[in-house]
Image: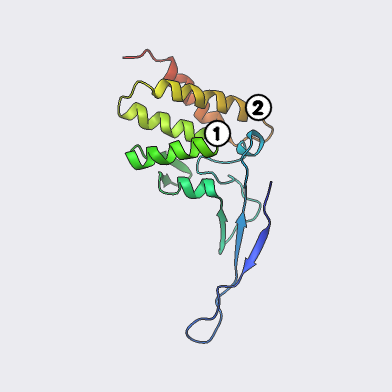
Amino acid sequence: MMGGIGLAWAGAQADGGYAEPTVETQLIAIITVENSAMLDATGKPYNPPVAGPGINYHSRLHRLLAHTYLEHGRKITFKTDRASEAAYRTVIAQYPHFPFGYYALALALRERRDATWRDVAQQAVEAFERTTAMPDCNVSHFMALKELRADLAEPAP
């Protein structure tokens, strides 16, 4: 279920003029395996249909993940602190088809040497196997799946 693009005026400014219009898009209300495959690790489409200044993409999923990662160019690093871990659990509960919730939680659990990370990583693998079977799947799904398989192949300490 895709939302539309809406034009919103920011309103009158103190100098009597008006702010430039901004375009906002509510992308996905319900995350399925099919549309989850097109999303990057932050919950946004990797190649948005519209791009440019004043255009912001919003979704509840993206807002849940907003403070749980660092961006380095096009590379994402998920945080492993307790607050981020709680956000990943919320993402998993609300968006069970979105594999990066499981992926990020597995990383956080592994970082703090919680043995359950392998179970969560296996759930991520299963979710990524579903999304990578979709046409036009975001390349980050394939990379994360490869990484998790390699991590799970290592013997447990």
Q: Position of residue 83 (x, y in %)?
A: 35, 42
Position of 2 with respect to 117 (left or right) is right
Q: Secondary structure at mark 1?
A: loop
* Residue at image point 59% right, 24% down: 129
Residue 97 lies left or right of residue 82; in this view the side is right
The image shows residue 23, relative to residue 20, as above or below, that is: above
Q: CA distance from mark 2 to mark 1?
A: 17 Å
Residue type indicated by callout 1: Pro
| Element at label 2 | loop
Quarter the C terminus occupies? top left
Pick the residue in front: 107 or 89. 89
Q: Quick one: which residue is furthest to the top in this view?
A: 155
Between 101 and 53, the one lying in front of the other is 101
The tag on residue 57 is: none
Check disc 2 and report the residue beneath it.
Answer: 133
Q: Are marks 2 and 1 in contact (CB under 8 Å)?
A: no
Judge left or right: residue 73 versus residue 56: left
Residue at which label 1 appears:
96
Q: Residue at x 55, y 35 (%)?
A: 98
Is the residue 130 above or below the residue 95 in the image?
above
Camera-near label (2 vs 1) is 1
Task: Give the quarter of the image for residue 55.
Answer: bottom right
Image spot of residue 113 (x, y percent)? 30, 24
